[in-house]
Amino acid sequence: MVLDEKDRILIAALRKNARESLVGLARSVGLSRSATQERMRRLEREGIIKAYTVELASAHDPAVRAMIAVTFEPGFRCKQVVPRLAGIPEVVACHSLTGSIDLMVNVACDSNATLNRIRDVVASVTGVATATTHIVLATEWERE
């Protein structure tokens, strides 16, 4: 699906405030309320808009965020390792990569002790050769 200028304006407005009223969104895009609503439905139907999210205030952010760079033992692939990581609630994302790192595991948790426990669990998964932890000091900006 090719996005036109109105689609891009609508998506930018939703990124800024996913709770914006339909009338406010229509005003931003320069379309009627019904045309904006139909455009949103089409974007949802086509999978361009997958979800509407909540951004928590910093007081509710996890105390610790980290990325664990994982390499696999020879012969292992994501399909064998990732399902074992999906059951860890603090693992918020897994990204398959090219290059020397096979998988980047994003973690959000309440303490360094919890991060250490999670890192040990990740490192003990069958097929994981190395698990190198990188603690996030600050998120300078983020776009979903």
Image: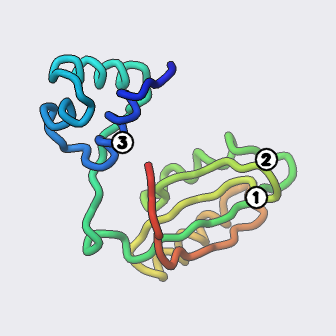
Q: Nearer the viewer, mark 3 or mark 2?
A: 3
The residue to which callout 1 is attached is: 101
Q: Quadrant of residue 5?
A: top left
The residue to which callout 2 is attached is: 76
Q: Nearer the viewer, mark 1 or mark 3?
A: 3
Q: Amino acid at mark 1?
A: Ile
Give the mark nearer the N terminus: 1 vs 2.
2
Q: Quadrant of residue 48?
A: top left
Give the mark nearer the N terminus: 1 vs 3.
3
> Could you tell me which residue is drawn at 46 percent across and 76 percent down?
114
Nearest the viewer among 30 and 118 is: 30
Left or right of 39? Residue 113 is right
Residue 77 in picture, x, y percent from top left: 75, 44
Task: Find the residue positioned furthest to the right.
Answer: 74
Residue 140 in picture, x, y percent from top left: 47, 70
Q: Label 3, secondary structure: give it.
A: helix
Give the mark nearer the N terminus: 3 vs 2.
3
The residue to which callout 3 is attached is: 12
> Could you tell me which residue is drawn at 25 percent across and 74 percent down?
59
